[in-house]
Amino acid sequence: MEGGGAAALAAVLAKKVTISPDENVNVVLSGGNIDANLLARVLEQVLVRQGRYMMLKMLVLDRPGSLAGALDAVAEVGANVIEVFHRRAMWLAPLGRVGIEMLLEVRDESHAKDVIKHLEDKGYTPEREGQSDWAE
């Protein structure tokens, strides 16, 4: 549903429409003028602002299973992996190490801190990326 599709409901709630106590009223809620890609971006931004998405980055040994181990540690504490980037060249990581960036879905800020603590307890050194300071 989009904002314009809620106009009828807003009119009823604001008592702009006279309704008798014995009347039944149906309000049509509609939408569809918002592009699906724009809606997805709006929802993602809401999740970031609510602290439900967080970005972590860390260096791990460049060995078979290192990425799987980091992902297992995230799963152990109940975070959901949205995206993973496994980077060597872009980070200019030291030889023998590789950079991992993870976009994670968490329940709230407390859960985010639990995820970081759990990773640290497992021997990782996660760095949390902050929200952008770009002007609206």
Image (tube, rainbow, N blue to C red):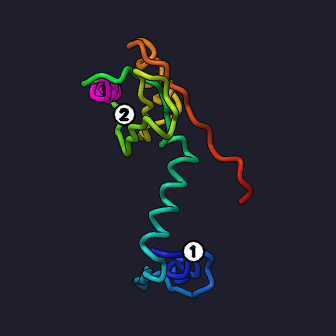
Dots 2 and 1: beta carbons under 8 Å? no
- Above or below residue 126? Residue 55 is below
The residue sitting at 43% across, 85% down in the picture is 23
Image quadrant for the N terminus?
Answer: bottom left
The residue sitting at 34% across, 38% down in the picture is 80
Q: Residue furthest right?
A: 135
Neighbour class for label 2 at 10 Å: few (<14), some, many (≥20)? many
Please give the residue where the numbered disc 2 appears in the rendered image: 79
Image quadrant for the C terminus?
Answer: bottom right
Bounds of the magenta segment: 66-75
Q: Can the viewer see residue 106?
A: no
On screen, residue 53 versus residue 17, left or right, reads left
- Residue 50 is tagged as none
Helix, strand or loop: magenta stretch: helix
Q: Amino acid at mark 1?
A: Leu
Please give the residue where the numbered disc 1 appears in the rendered image: 13
Residue 35 image position (x, y, % from top left): 46, 76
On screen, residue 84 versus residue 13, left or right, reads left
Q: Can the viewer see residue 17?
A: yes
Question: Disc 2 on helix, strand or loop?
Answer: loop
Q: Amino acid at mark 2?
A: Ala
- Above or below residue 83? Residue 5 is below
Q: Quadrant of residue 50?
A: top right
Distance from disc 2 to disc 1, alpha carbons, whole Å, reads 39 Å
Residue 73 image position (x, y, % from top left): 33, 23
Q: Quadrant of residue 76?
A: top left
Q: Nearer the viewer, residue 24 or 22?
A: 24
